[in-house]
């Protein structure tokens, strides 16, 4: 049987509010994953330190490993904080301007 009904029309919806804690959690995970992706770059700092004089080598190695371990956590915390703040600011602006209009089917 052939469907002769017209295609569904797009419906415009307005995003009026974003839950700050939910957006903060989502961005914390996303930014944490991004931080994990950067671990090899920070560990390469430790590998480069093998070419330094013996007195400077240990400090640069410790710095590279420390940054590699701290950055995913720091990125996740910053993602949460800025996600929650961004949602709060969006909610305030959306009250004045009416929110973002999106089309859905």
Image: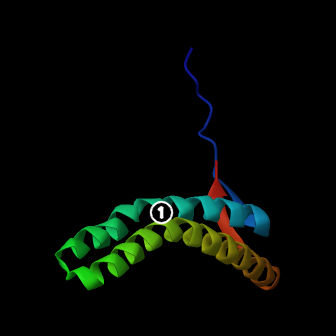
Q: Position of residue 40 (x, y in %)?
A: 34, 62
| Residue 18, visible in the rendered structure | no
Frontmost residue, 17 versus 52: 52
Give the residue at x 74% y 66%: 14
**Residue under circle 1?**
34
Residue 12 vertical position relative to residue 56 in the rendered view, above or below:
above
Give the residue at x 17% y 76%: 51
Q: Position of residue 2 (x, y in %)?
A: 55, 19
- Quarter of the view holding residue 6: top right
Residue 45 vertical position relative to residue 1 in the rendered view, above or below:
below
Callout 1: SS: helix
Frontmost residue, 11 versus 2: 11
- Quarter of the view holding residue 1: top right
Q: Residues within 10 Å of mark 1 (few under 14, many from 20)?
A: some
Q: Name the colouring of the figure.
A: rainbow
Which residue reaches farthest left? 51
Q: Position of residue 41 (x, y in %)?
A: 33, 67
């Amino acid at each position: 049987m052939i469907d002769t009904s017209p295609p569904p029309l797009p419906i415009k919806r307005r995003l009026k509010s974003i839950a700050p804690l939910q957006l903060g959690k989502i961005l914390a995970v996303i930014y944490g994953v991004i931080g994990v992706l950067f671990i090899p770059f920070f560990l390469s700092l430790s590998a480069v330190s093998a070419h330094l004089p013996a007195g400077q080598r240990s400090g640069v190695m410790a710095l590279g490993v420390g940054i590699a371990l701290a950055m995913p956590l720091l990125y996740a915390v910053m993602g949460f904080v800025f996600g929650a703040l961004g949602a709060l600011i969006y909610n305030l602006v959306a009250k004045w301007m009416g929110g973002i209009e999106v089309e859905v089917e």
